[in-house]
Amino acid sequence: MSDAIYAFHISTFEAALEDWKREQLEAYPHQAELIETVALAMRDFMDSEPVRRHKMRVERSPRQGAG
């Protein structure tokens, strides 16, 4: 998996994360607090300085010269 490249819109990430949480909670209901904490950490990571610094995030820039 070291050569894998992930590309997704944040809405796809959120949907996948919710699916993951649901699956984990079904499999490990006694670990609900940990699963919620991990999901929050994943969301925080996606909006973190390391993600920006390593250029893992691409954002739409305003169109120059339009109009």
Image (tube, rainbow, N blue to C red):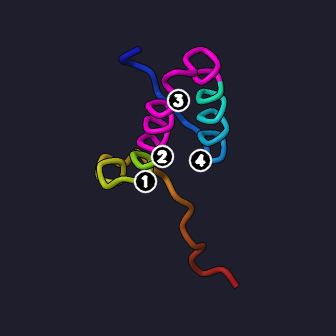
> Which residues lie in the magenta part?
23-43
Q: Earlier in the sequence, mark 1 or mark 4?
A: 4
Residue at the disc numbered 2: 43
Quadrant placement of the C terminus: bottom right
User: Which mark is first along the chain, 2 or 4?
Assistant: 4
Question: What is the spatial separation of the Cα atoms under label 3 and label 1, in whole angstroms?
Answer: 23 Å
Q: Earlier in the sequence, mark 3 or mark 2?
A: 3
Q: Earlier in the sequence, mark 3 or mark 1?
A: 3
- Queried whether the magenta region covers residue 52, the answer comes back as no
Q: Residue 24: within the magenta?
A: yes
Numbered circle sitting on residue 32:
3
User: Label 3's element?
Assistant: helix
Is the residue 11 above or below the residue 18 in the image? below
From the image, tell me which residue sits under label 4: 10
- Toward the right, the furthest residue is 67
Rounded to the nearest angstrom, the CA distance separating label 1 from label 2 is 7 Å
